[in-house]
C-alpha cells in the first residue's frame, strides 16, 4: 500500500468571541464552535470586567478559570456554527506570525549589553527621550532600521522591562530588551 501525503485539515480557533448589543447592554460572548454553546458571557461595558486597573482579568484568564483555552483549535468542518470565509487561512497566518514573534523573543538580546558604551548616557529617569536620542540612534549606527520601542512589563511607577523591534541590515526582524 502506498501512502500519500494528504493535506492537513484546515484548523480554526475552537472558541470565538462576539458581542451582543442592544439599547442597554454590551456583552462579550465566547462560544464553543464544537458544541455551539456559550461558555462565557460578561458585561463588556463594566470597567471591572475589562480594565486591568480595576482588577479585570483577560479573556484568556476568564476562560482558563472555566477550563477553556483560547488557543484551542478544531478542524474547520467540525464547527457547528457558521465560520466566515477565509477564517482558516487567517488563523494559519496568525499562528505563523505568533510563532515568528515567539522565536524573535527567544533570540532577543539585552540591548544595554549589545550597545555597550553607546548606551552609557542613557538614563531610566527619562527613558522615552533616551530611546529617541540615544538608544535608537545607536542601533541605527549599527545598520538597524524600522526601530520601535514597546512596553513588556510595567508597574505603577513606570516601565520595568522595555522591548525593541528592529530590522537588521540583512532584512531579518530582531528584538532586544532592557530594564
Image (spheres, rainbow, N blue to C red):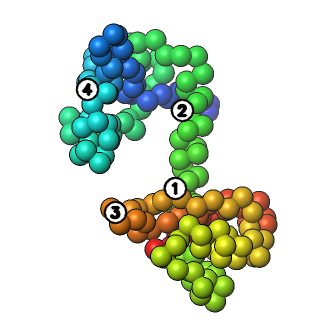
State the residue at coordinates (27%, 25%).
43
Q: Sequence order check: which comes first, mark 1 or mark 3?
A: 1
Q: CA distance from mark 2 to mark 1?
A: 16 Å
Q: Nearer the viewer, mark 1 or mark 3?
A: 3
Residue beneath disc 2: 91
- Tell me which label, 2 or 1, sits earlier in the chain: 2
Residue designated by label 4 = 42
Along the line of sight, which residue is nearer the eye, 159 or 66? 159
Residue with the mark numbered 3: 155
Report if the CB atoms under discs 3 and 4 are less than 8 Å apart.
Answer: no
**Number of numbered callouts drawn:** 4
- Position of 116 compared to 13: left or right? right
User: Is residue 172 shown to the viewer in this render?
Assistant: no
Q: Secondary structure at mark 3?
A: strand
Q: Who comes first in sequence, dot 2 or dot 4?
A: 4
Quadrant of residue 56 in the image?
top left
Secondary structure at badge 2 equals helix
The disc, 2 or 3, on the residue closer to the chain's N-terminal end is 2
Crowd tier of the residue under label 4, counting other residues whose Cα lies within 10 Å: few below 14, some 14–19, many 20 or above: some
Identified at 43% across, 30% down, the residue is: 13
Relative side of 163 to 34, left or right: right
Mark 4 or mark 1: name the one nearer the start of the chain.
4
Marks 2/4: CA–CA distance? 25 Å
In percent of width and height, residue 146 lies at 72, 58
Say the numbered circle drawn on residue 102: 1
Amino acid at each position: 500500500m502506498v501512502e500519500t501525503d494528504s493535506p492537513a485539515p484546515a484548523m480554526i480557533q475552537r472558541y470565538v468571541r462576539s458581542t451582543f448589543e442592544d439599547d442597554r447592554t454590551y456583552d462579550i460572548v465566547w462560544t464553543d464552535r464544537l458544541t455551539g454553546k456559550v461558555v462565557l458571557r460578561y458585561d463588556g461595558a463594566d470597567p471591572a470586567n475589562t480594565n486591568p486597573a480595576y482588577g479585570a482579568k483577560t479573556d484568556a484568564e476568564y476562560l482558563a478559570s472555566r477550563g477553556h483555552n483560547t488557543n484551542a483549535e478544531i478542524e474547520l468542518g467540525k464547527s457547528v456554527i457558521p465560520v466566515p470565509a477565509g477564517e482558516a487561512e487567517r488563523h494559519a497566518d496568525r499562528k505563523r506570525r505568533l510563532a515568528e514573534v515567539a522565536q524573535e523573543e527567544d533570540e532577543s538580546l539585552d540591548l544595554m549589553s549589545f550597545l555597550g558604551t553607546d548606551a552609557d548616557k542613557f538614563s531610566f529617569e527619562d527613558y522615552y527621550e533616551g530611546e529617541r536620542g540615544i538608544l535608537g540612534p545607536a542601533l541605527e549606527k549599527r545598520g538597524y532600521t524600522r526601530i520601535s520601542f514597546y512596553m513588556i512589563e510595567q508597574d505603577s511607577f513606570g516601565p520595568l522591562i522595555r522591548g525593541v523591534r528592529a530590522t537588521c541590515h540583512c532584512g531579518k526582524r530582531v528584538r532586544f530588551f532592557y530594564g
